Image (cartoon, rainbow, N blue to C red):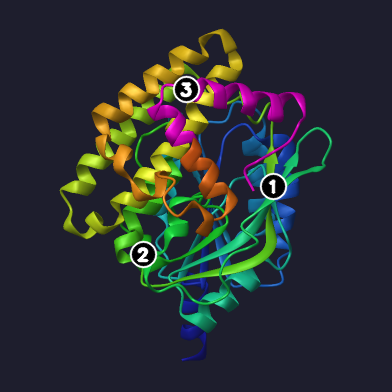
């Protein structure tokens, strides 16, 4: 009887950690050491190597030899990209553990990361537990900014009326998910903002959210965090992905009450983030990207113009980021958003200020 219970625990750890890997060999030791040295140890790791061309697989196999009972290695036959690689991990994970973490393999964790996430999830019976994060510069190691550390202390249960869902960072790696909420869900093939679509896809199932206002996750900012990692192809993929998701959500009655908040996230990712990052690469095309994005929003998300979160009504009752976002929406409506781009460029690229916190 005792042996059977021990075997079941090995097969079903409380937490399953899914880690996609692609050409991040210089960072894997730091990542895995921060993971295997956690103060909470009841977890398994499902590593999916996405056809890396560096020595990432060699390093993965070294850790697999050290932790053969806890580390499961999956190798993609072809390079599938982040979203599909995460899907492979979710599909191959055959454990019935209570929680799932979706981490990035070039970052690192506080050693109490899993312990504090699980203890809060257990204490408050939360479906999603969210911790604070730090962005740090890959070259200098210095903190760029801290996010998600000024959230409500109480358990959030009125999900559809929780306005912060429209503004908060939707990344998955600072979130602990209850397995039953996400186990049969899939990431879309969108090449950017896949986390936004994934989060809003599962929200109808979520009954409670708990925040931990403490930095437990360290995100590595590689290259130029503002103009890097986006191309016209990626941007167009993001626009198509959001448009397709909108249609799917409107066909699903459970998502109707979340659409206003989803539109806000679309505006942040496409209208502000995407348009600005592309313009930063060639400021002479700032007007082109502004016009391209406004036409897209008018065609695919016409409701953005009347969205209550993107208006200046009752601005004095809202926090500064929400007010600034509404100002950006007003500038779009007045065909003046290019002014915002130039101001953002000056503050971010010249004065080196980061405004994502």
| Residue closest to the eye, 107 or 330 | 330
Label 1: how many Cα within 10 Å (few below 14, some 14–19, many 20+) = few
* 345 drawn magenta: yes
Residue under numbered circle 3: 336
Where disc 1 sits, the SS reads helix
* Residue name at image x 69 percent, y 30 percent: 348
| Badge nearest the viewer, 3 or 2 | 3
Q: Quadrant of residue 243?
A: top left
Image coordinates of residue 100 in percent, x first then y, are: 48, 62
Residue 33 screen position, x and y as percent = 74, 55
Which residue occupies the extreme top position in the image?
284
First of labels 3, 2 by sequence position: 2
Quick check: can you spot residue 51?
yes
Element assignment for label 2: helix
- Residue tagged by mark 2? 161
Instruction: State the CA–CA distance, disc 3 to disc 1.
Output: 55 Å
Q: In the image, which residues are magenta?
A: 328-357
Q: Is residue 229 above or below residue 17?
A: above
């Amino acid at each position: 009887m005792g042996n059977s219970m021990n075997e079941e625990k090995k097969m079903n750890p409380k937490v399953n950690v899914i880690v996609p890997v692609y050409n991040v060999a210089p960072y894997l030791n730091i990542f895995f050491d921060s993971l295997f040295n956690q103060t909470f140890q009841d977890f398994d790791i499902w590593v999916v190597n996405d056809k890396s061309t560096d020595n990432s697989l060699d390093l993965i196999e070294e850790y697999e030899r050290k932790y053969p009972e806890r580390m499961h290695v999956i190798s993609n036959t072809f390079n599938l990209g982040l979203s599909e690689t995460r899907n492979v991990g979710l599909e191959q994970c055959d454990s019935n553990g209570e929680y799932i973490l979706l981490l990035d393999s070039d970052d690192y964790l506080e050693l109490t990361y899993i312990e504090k996430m699980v203890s809060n999830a257990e204490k408050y019976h939360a479906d999603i537990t969210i911790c604070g994060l730090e962005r740090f510069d890959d070259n200098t190691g210095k903190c760029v900014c801290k996010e998600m550390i000024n959230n409500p202390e109480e358990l959030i249960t009125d999900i559809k009326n929780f306005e912060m869902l429209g503004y908060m960072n939707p990344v998955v790696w600072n979130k602990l998910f209850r397995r039953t909420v996400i186990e049969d869900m899939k990431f879309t093939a969108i090449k950017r903002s896949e986390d936004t679509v994934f989060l809003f896809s599962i929200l109808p199932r979520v009954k409670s959210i708990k925040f931990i206002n403490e930095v437990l996750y360290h995100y590595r900012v590689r290259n130029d965090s503002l103009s890097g990692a986006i191309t016209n192809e990626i941007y167009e993929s993001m626009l198509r992905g959001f448009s397709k998701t909108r249609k799917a959500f409107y066909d699903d009655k459970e998502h109707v009450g979340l659409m206003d908040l989803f539109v806000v996230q679309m505006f942040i990712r496409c209208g502000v983030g995407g348009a600005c990052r592309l313009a930063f690469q060639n400021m002479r095309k700032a007007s082109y990207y502004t016009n391209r994005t406004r036409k897209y929003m008018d065609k695919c998300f016409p409701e953005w113009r009347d969205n209550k979160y993107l208006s200046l009504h009752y601005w004095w009752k809202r926090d500064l980021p929400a007010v600034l976002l509404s100002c950006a929406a007003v500038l779009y409506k007045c065909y003046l958003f290019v002014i915002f781009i130039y101001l953002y460029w000056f503050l971010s690229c010249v004065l080196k200020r980061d405004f994502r916190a």
